[in-house]
Image (spheres, grey):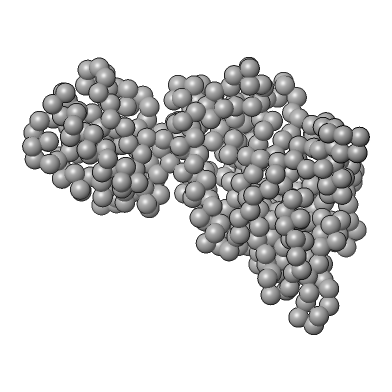
Amino acid sequence: MIDHRRLGRELDLFVSDPLAGAGLPIWLPAGAAARHAVEEYVRELERRSGHQHVYSPPLGKRELFELSGHLGYFADDMFPPMRLSADDEVVLRPALCPHHALVFRARGRSSRELPLRIAELGGMYRSERSGVLGGLSRVRAISLNDAHTFCAPDQVGAEVVEILRLIRAAQAALGVRPAGFRLSVRGPAGRYVGDDAQWSYAENLLRGALDGAEYVEVPGEAAFYGPKIDIQIVDAAGRESTISTIQLDFDKPERFDLSYTDSDGSRRRPVMVHRSLVGSMERLFAYLIEVHEGAFPAWYAPVQLALLPVGDEQAGAAAELARRALDAGLRVEVDVAGSLGARVRDAARRRIPYLGVLGSREVADGRLALRLRGGRALDPMPVADVLALISGQVAARAADLLPPG
């Protein structure tokens, strides 16, 4: 069975070392390169859609999480507070929303600024039991692609529709195959904040945004502060989990006394929309490693081009070509160790998308014999054409290694 933990070891993507601790994986250079490419893409997608990015600390004073409601509703999933002095305790955050509420209230806000979209790829922490931890799919230190939109009540519906569009775009680029939508609403039991009117309004807004899409409504699975849309995936073992989410929240703006000045000069309370386009980097890559079997699309492959000089005489030309590829923005390696056959097999094992072999004839002609992942060999091409081909597929974030036609 395909298992991201096994592939992660074989491809040197990440390591779980007992000395670091359970649920605290370390991203190795290859995994970090792939993750960095995905993070850059998501940040740019968010920037183009009007999000403003921030940095906030992964911990805060106990009072922050008492005010947010997390200590009252979520304490079992949080790490214990750390006492710094008799009157000063800090807590590793289980979510980013309290800090983003502080971003909103950092100064006065006007209705002209809304929707205000605050985004961050930030760390948060959950005190998961050792028995449920595994690889990247369930961890204690989480790097979350997160954002919170503060909007007027009449902007919420359009905002949710736009978020769903962004989620679909990101999933298509990454090769995520969604398994379905879930609308999580209140159940008869459970601890929820807010009044019935707010909940009914929020649930109906999300139903309207999902109009035309097939979804399952799940009572009792809502967050304590509001209903949510979850987009599900299924891993290689058949386990279902959430990768993307949209959550409506009328509670945090009340708790943090958030307000904006409306066009008539009155003070209004914003609605807070929580959303994650691709979830945590850990869970996302656990899924991507398995769904692609380690053969990532070229745009986020750890190494995009491997250059193999046939002999020592071509080593200088390979190094010069590598410099040109680096200048073109590609991730490239030159492999000179061992026989040519062994190096070709190693590149295949590592799922490198493009493999360039340089013999004496190719060097003399200024050409490169390119092989694609999977074994297909292309006729030798001018080096500039090879770099343009690879750069074009990477820039397009194409799923295929060659352009259509």
Task: Spot the residue most to the bottom.
Answer: 264
> Residue 348, percent across and down?
33, 27
Residue at coordinates 37% horizontally, 35% vertically from top-left? Answer: 303
Which quadrant of the figure has residue 84? top right
Q: Is residue 298 left or right of residue 59?
A: left
Residue 44 position in % (x across, y down): 50, 55
Q: Nearer the viewer, residue 275 or 382?
A: 382
> Can residue 217 be spotted in the picture?
no
**Outermost residue, front direction?**
85
Q: Position of residue 45 (x, y in %)?
A: 52, 56
Vertical relation: 278 (above or below) 104:
above
Identity of the residue drawn at 72% across and 57% down? 103
Left or right of 327, for residue 193: right
Which of 138 and 391 lies nearest the eye of the viewer? 391
- The residue closer to the viewer here, 254 or 188, is 254
Number of numbered discs overlaid on the protein picture: 0
**Left or right of residue 6, residue 232 in this image:** right
Q: Quadrant of residue 135?
A: top right
Tell me what residue is drawn at x 26 percent, y 50 percent: 388
Give the residue displayed 56% in from the left and 62% down from the top. 49
| Residue 346 seen in the figure | yes
Q: Position of residue 183 (x, y in %)?
A: 72, 51
Q: Is residue 342 left or right of residue 91?
A: left
